[in-house]
Image (cartoon, helix red, strand yellow):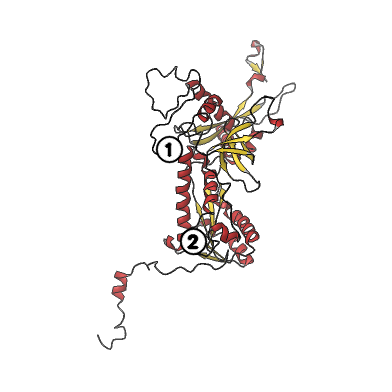
């Protein structure tokens, strides 16, 4: 209809054909470090890490693509983590954060976070709902981390509880490799080089979960004993000049720089030996030579297995890559590991990495006693003494070994009761 004031606009067409705006426009990247920082929270992870965390908070600098990851137990910890990241990043680069971009999750809409950003002069941006493309660089990082963690755990055959250490190990290698965004830049052209303004070193990079011989000082070993400790590489500490190892026999961390790496041997390559291995079996596994040739389909094993290893097997067929472990050693390994993870007192529980879970278990136990009316306040009769109590803690696990729940029992020390005279009508006196 010519001459109609709305002849160039069809509202019905807009109502029926309006679609999302395509995300094909060229992205404008930051020109200096920390000019724009992206952040996101990933989790909860189905398996709690060895250190008790189930989330990770990631920050990535748009200019250098340098990622930083922090591990937390609750989403409410994001605010404190961002303050740590800001202080560290600004001290390392000499620049200030100008813009913080996130997906507008509940942890990023806190009033105290908005107030903190306003006082610091940091502009806060949120992506539009259901448009993850606006946070594409962070989505790519989460996918890369997930794939990298899975690859390292598969290579090392460590338990999924080590995903936190695998994440840090993977990131440490990723920041020193060029990416599709940083490669076109003139040298330096890796996230590490662009973020720190200097070249990084590749000499100390080693395979995650490989066998390591750690030097023992004279005061740590007796005369004529081996001067090395067989450990597993789990990462690179930021506060020490060395490597981070795990002693699977003593179940403790070791940090050292006097080491020899056996890069082709992974002590936990056999499924089922994820956290702890009996010492005799571990030594036999580590003594097995590994054939690095890709063309070879078989691995020659010249080392003899532990004594009595095959006595209980009967006529069971085994492939060349199988390892036979005595059932008694395996049971001893499982019970030993379970016992060391469970505190034996309330004081010890409060010092554990998963203290929050143990506190929750004790509160549930006390609440159950109060609801059931287990006790009533009373005056202690003259000449009588109270019976003591003790906390018993236990980790309930699912069939596949994952933690199902933490359980605590408050039990009376019945052994302190004194038998009474039967004529009094009571079997015991307190």
How far is disc 1 from disc 2 in space, using C-alphas? 32 Å
Could one spot residue 373 in this view of the protein?
A: no
For this orientation, the residue located farthest to the bottom is 3
The answer to whether 143 is drawn above or below residue 183 in the figure is above
Query: Which label sits on residue 68?
Result: none
The image shows residue 408 at horizontal and vertical percentages of 57, 32
The answer to whether 74 is drawn above or below residue 130 in the figure is above
Query: Splitting the image into 4 quarters, where does residue 297 fall?
Result: top left
For this orientation, the residue located farthest to the right is 383
Q: Nearer the viewer, residue 369 or 108?
A: 108
The image shows residue 161 at horizontal and vertical percentages of 51, 39
Query: Splitting the image into 4 quarters, where does residue 341 fall?
Result: top right
- Label 1 element class: loop
Front of the two marks 1 and 2 = 1
Give the crowd class for mark 2: few <14, some 14-19, many >=20 residues within 10 Å: some
On screen, residue 362 versus residue 314, left or right, reads right
The answer to whether 305 is drawn above or below residue 139 in the figure is above
> In percent of the image, x 28 and y 86: which residue is there?
4
> In percent of the image, x 59 and y 45: which residue is there?
236
Q: Nearer the viewer, residue 177 or 108?
A: 177
Query: Which label sits on residue 183?
Result: 2
In which quadrant is the N terminus drawn? Answer: bottom left
The image shows residue 361 at horizontal and vertical percentages of 57, 36
The image shows residue 331 at horizontal and vertical percentages of 50, 24
Residue matched to label 1: 293
First of labels 1, 2 by sequence position: 2
- Label 2 element class: loop
On screen, residue 401 versus residue 350, left or right, reads left
Could one spot residue 294 in this view of the protein?
A: yes
Query: Splitting the image into 4 quarters, where does residue 223 fall?
Result: top right
Give the crowd class for mark 1: few <14, some 14-19, many >=20 residues within 10 Å: few
């Amino acid at each position: 209809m010519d001459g109609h004031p709305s002849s160039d606009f069809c509202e019905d067409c807009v109502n029926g054909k309006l679609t999302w705006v395509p995300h094909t426009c060229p992205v404008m990247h930051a020109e200096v470090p920390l000019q724009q920082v992206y952040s996101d929270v990933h989790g909860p992870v189905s398996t709690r890490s060895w250190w008790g965390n189930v989330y990770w908070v990631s920050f990535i600098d748009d200019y250098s693509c340098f990622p930083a990851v922090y591990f937390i137990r609750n989403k409410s910890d994001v605010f404190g983590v961002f303050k740590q990241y800001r202080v560290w990043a600004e001290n390392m680069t000499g620049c200030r954060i100008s813009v913080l971009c996130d997906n507008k999750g509940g942890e990023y809409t806190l009033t105290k976070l908005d107030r903190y950003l306003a006082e610091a002069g940091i502009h806060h941006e949120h992506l539009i709902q259901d448009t993850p493309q606006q946070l594409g660089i962070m989505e790519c990082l989460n996918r890369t981390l997930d794939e990298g963690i899975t690859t390292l755990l598969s290579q090392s055959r460590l338990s999924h509880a080590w995903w936190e250490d695998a994440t840090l190990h993977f990131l440490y290698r990723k920041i020193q490799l060029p990416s599709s965004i940083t490669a076109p830049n003139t040298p330096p052209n890796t996230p590490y080089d662009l973020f720190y303004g200097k070249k990084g070193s590749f000499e100390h990079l080693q395979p995650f979960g490989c066998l390591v011989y750690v030097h023992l000082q004279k005061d740590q070993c007796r005369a004529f004993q081996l001067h090395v400790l067989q450990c597993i590489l789990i990462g690179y500490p930021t506060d020490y000049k060395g490597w981070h190892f795990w002693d699977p026999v003593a179940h403790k961390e070791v940090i050292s720089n006097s080491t020899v790496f056996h890069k082709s041997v992974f002590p936990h390559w056999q499924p089922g030996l994820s956290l702890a291995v009996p010492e005799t079996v571990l030594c036999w596994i580590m003594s097995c030579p590994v054939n690095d040739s890709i063309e070879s389909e078989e691995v020659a094993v010249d080392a003899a297995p532990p004594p009595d290893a095959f006595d209980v097997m009967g006529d069971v067929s085994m492939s060349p890559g199988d390892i036979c472990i005595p059932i008694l050693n395996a049971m001893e390994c499982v019970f030993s590991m379970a016992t060391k993870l469970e505190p034996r007192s309330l004081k010890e529980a409060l010092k554990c990495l998963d203290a929050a879970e143990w506190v929750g278990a004790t509160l549930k136990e006390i609440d159950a006693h109060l609801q059931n009316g287990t006790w009533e306040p009373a005056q202690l009769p003259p000449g009588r003494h109270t019976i003591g109590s003790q906390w018993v803690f236990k980790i309930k696990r699912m069939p596949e070994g994952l933690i199902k729940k933490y359980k605590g029992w408050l039990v009376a020390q019945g052994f302190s009761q004194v038998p009474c005279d039967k004529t009094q009508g009571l079997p015991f006196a307190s």
